[in-house]
Amino acid sequence: ASACVIHWRGFRVAPLVCYDLRFPVFSRRREGYYYDLLLYIASWPAARRHAWRTLLAARAIENQAYVVGVNRVGKDGNGHPHAGDSVAHDFLGQPLVELGDEPAVATATLDGAALTAFRERFPAHRDADRFTLLP
């Protein structure tokens, strides 16, 4: 998993790939890895769409961060269907925008001040387990 954080328009963005979504420790906000937005780029198959939807919301809630999941639609080169289900969640796990199984473009507004205020009112990250990811 990447520990990359990109600064964009006042937000700290952590880009990840689809399989990283299954491992919460890869996206855990921790010392030296602070972000406001997790961005998952995916080729998540339709057969596992419930997991895709559920885990994206979970990552938003547990990390008190915006989470965007961008998934492909249609069949891949092996004939496996992909349902899309691209979504943007707020830091409470509530969807801001949800797309279906057709190609589409959507816009969501992220409120950095609201995110900061929520983290200050409910600093759950202070109780997280300490750990180190080994290379």
Image: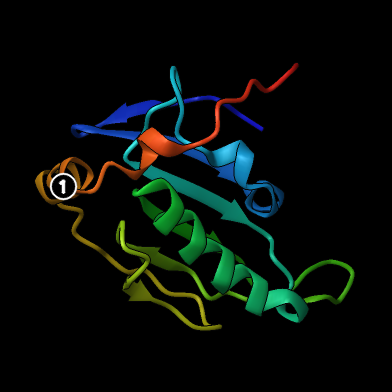
Q: Provide residue 57's location: percent of width, then percent of height.
A: 46, 65
Residue 39 in picture, x, y percent from top left: 46, 47
Q: Quadrant of residue 104?
A: bottom left
Of the 4 image quadrants, the one containing the C terminus is: top right
Query: Left or right of 129: which side holds 51?
Result: right
Q: Residue type at mark 1?
A: Arg
Please report the residue visible at 23 percent of the width from the left and 48 percent of the height from the top: 122
Secondary structure at badge 1 equals helix
Q: Nearer the viewer, residue 56 or 131?
A: 131
Q: Residue furthest front?
A: 127
Q: Is residue 20 visible?
A: yes
Please count the marks in the image. Answer: 1
For the point 16% across and 47% down, the residue is 121
Q: Quadrant of the N terminus?
A: top right
Tell me what residue is drawn at x 73 percent, y 75 percent.
Answer: 48
Name which residue lies at 23% across and 43% down: 119
**Which residue, as the protein is rendered here, is positioned at the far right?**
78
Q: Where 132 sits versus 93, above or below?
A: above
Residue 117 image offset from top left, x and y in percent: 12, 45
Q: Position of residue 2 (x, y in %)?
A: 61, 29
Q: List the residue tagged with mark 1.
A: 121
6 vs 117, left or right, is right
Along the line of sight, the residue nearer the viewer: 15 or 94: 94
Q: Is 13 on the left or on the right of 131, as rendered?
A: left
Q: Residues within 10 Å of mark 1 (few under 14, many from 20)?
A: few
